[in-house]
Image: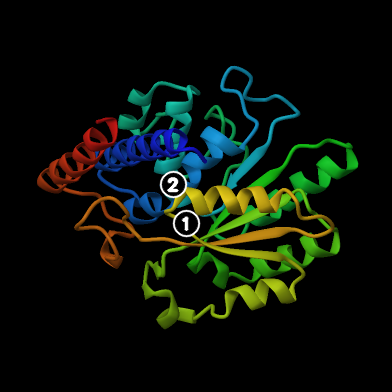
């Protein structure tokens, strides 16, 4: 990635974070912590990695993305809006009755959403089905699915992982947003996942471990994933919960809580300051 490309990615990720905060604040509820930790990877997917077109959101040859940890949709909505699927102003109606953008992704009402999700553990199964359909139809699109680390405690994740390996779904790339915190506390205290890399390897996956808040590492991981043949890939991305907002970083309390007016302003001030530096 060139320095200019890196700068553009960083600026876009900052905007994704700004709109994430806007959405959660105006909803008066939501999940900022995991949305902010995933913002860099979601930004890279939509602005560099995936073959998608906001003007043709149902193109059968497009790449697919499933946000299995659907409660972190504020970051997804921000990326979709910035990509041009709908107006960013829609984000301010997040979770409002009758609004297009609800608290979990809805493929029937939101342009750019490939799968409704939110019941943890199920998104990976849907992604497996999409990847298998591509194989059956001799299509070359790729399927990406993002899981939370706490979500990997769900048994269905491992049933789907076994299926993906058995069917040799090398067009499937999982991303685990490993920020170390879930609703009840530290993942290692609730139901430790480690060694997560060895677990996925034993299920037949190619495993790539990265810093999920570093665009150069993100790019290298996705480029490597595209070279893997005969088996699925998982990118285990170590991230910072609440990344970009100082008082939210590594704080489990921000898993599912909206900022009040003062906290909202402080978050926007920090993120806009970061964006100003990036824009020079």
Expressed as whole percent of the image width and height from the top left, the position of residue 278 reads 28, 36
Task: Look at the numbered discs 1 and 2 and tell me whether their residues touch, using CB distance below 8 Å.
Answer: yes
Mark with earlier residue (1, 2): 2
Q: CA distance from mark 1 to mark 2?
A: 7 Å
Q: Position of residue 235 (x, y in %)?
A: 60, 59
On the image, the x and y values in percent for residue 45 come to 55, 41
Could you tell whether 279 is left or right of 49 in the image? left
Relative vertical location of residue 97 with respect to residue 223 in this rendering, above or below: above
Q: Residues within 10 Å of mark 1 (few under 14, many from 20)?
A: many
Q: Residue furthest front?
A: 3
Choose between 272 and 76: the one closer to the eye: 272
Report x, y in % for residue 6. Answer: 44, 39
Q: Secondary structure at mark 2?
A: helix
Q: Residue at x 68, y 69 (%)?
A: 158
Q: Kindly identify which residue carries mark 2.
A: 40
Q: How many marks?
A: 2
Q: Quadrant of the C terminus?
A: top left
Residue shown at 85% from the left, 64% from the top? 166
Residue position for label 1:
212
| 78, above or below 175, in the image | above
Q: Residues within 10 Å of mark 2 (few under 14, many from 20)?
A: many
Marker disc for residue 204? none
Question: In the image, 222: left or right of 21?
Answer: right
Q: Is 230 left, or right, of 42 in this rendering?
A: right
State whether residue 194 is above or below residue 30: below
Q: Residue at x 37, y 67 (%)?
A: 183
């Amino acid at each position: 990635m060139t320095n200019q490309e890196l700068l553009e990615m960083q600026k876009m990720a900052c905007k994704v974070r700004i709109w994430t905060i806007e959405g959660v604040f105006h909803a008066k509820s939501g999940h900022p912590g995991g949305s902010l930790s995933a913002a860099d990877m979601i930004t890279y997917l939509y602005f560099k990695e995936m073959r998608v077109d906001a003007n043709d959101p149902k193109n059968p040859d497009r790449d697919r993305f499933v946000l299995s940890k659907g409660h972190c949709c504020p970051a997804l909505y921000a990326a979709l809006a910035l990509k041009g699927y709908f107006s960013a102003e829609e984000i301010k109606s997040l979770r409002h009755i009758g609004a297009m953008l609800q608290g979990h992704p809805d493929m029937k009402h939101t342009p750019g959403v490939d799968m409704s999700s939110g019941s943890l553990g199920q998104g990976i199964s849907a992604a497996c089905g999409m990847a298998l359909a591509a194989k059956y139809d001799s299509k070359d699109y790729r399927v990406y699915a993002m899981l939370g680390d706490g979500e990997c405690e769900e048994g269905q994740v491992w049933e789907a992982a076994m299926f993906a390996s058995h069917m040799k779904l090398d067009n499937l790339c999982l991303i685990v947003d490993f920020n170390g915190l879930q609703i009840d506390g530290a993942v290692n205290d609730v139901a430790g996942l480690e060694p997560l890399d060895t677990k996925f390897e034993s299920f037949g996956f190619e495993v790539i471990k990265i810093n999920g808040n570093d665009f150069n590492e993100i790019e290298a991981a996705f480029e490597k994933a595209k070279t893997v043949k005969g088996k699925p890939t998982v990118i285990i991305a170590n991230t910072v919960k609440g990344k970009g907002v100082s008082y939210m970083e590594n704080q489990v309390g921000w898993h599912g809580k909206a900022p009040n007016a003062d906290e909202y302003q402080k978050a926007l001030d920090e993120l806009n300051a970061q964006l100003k530096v990036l824009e020079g």
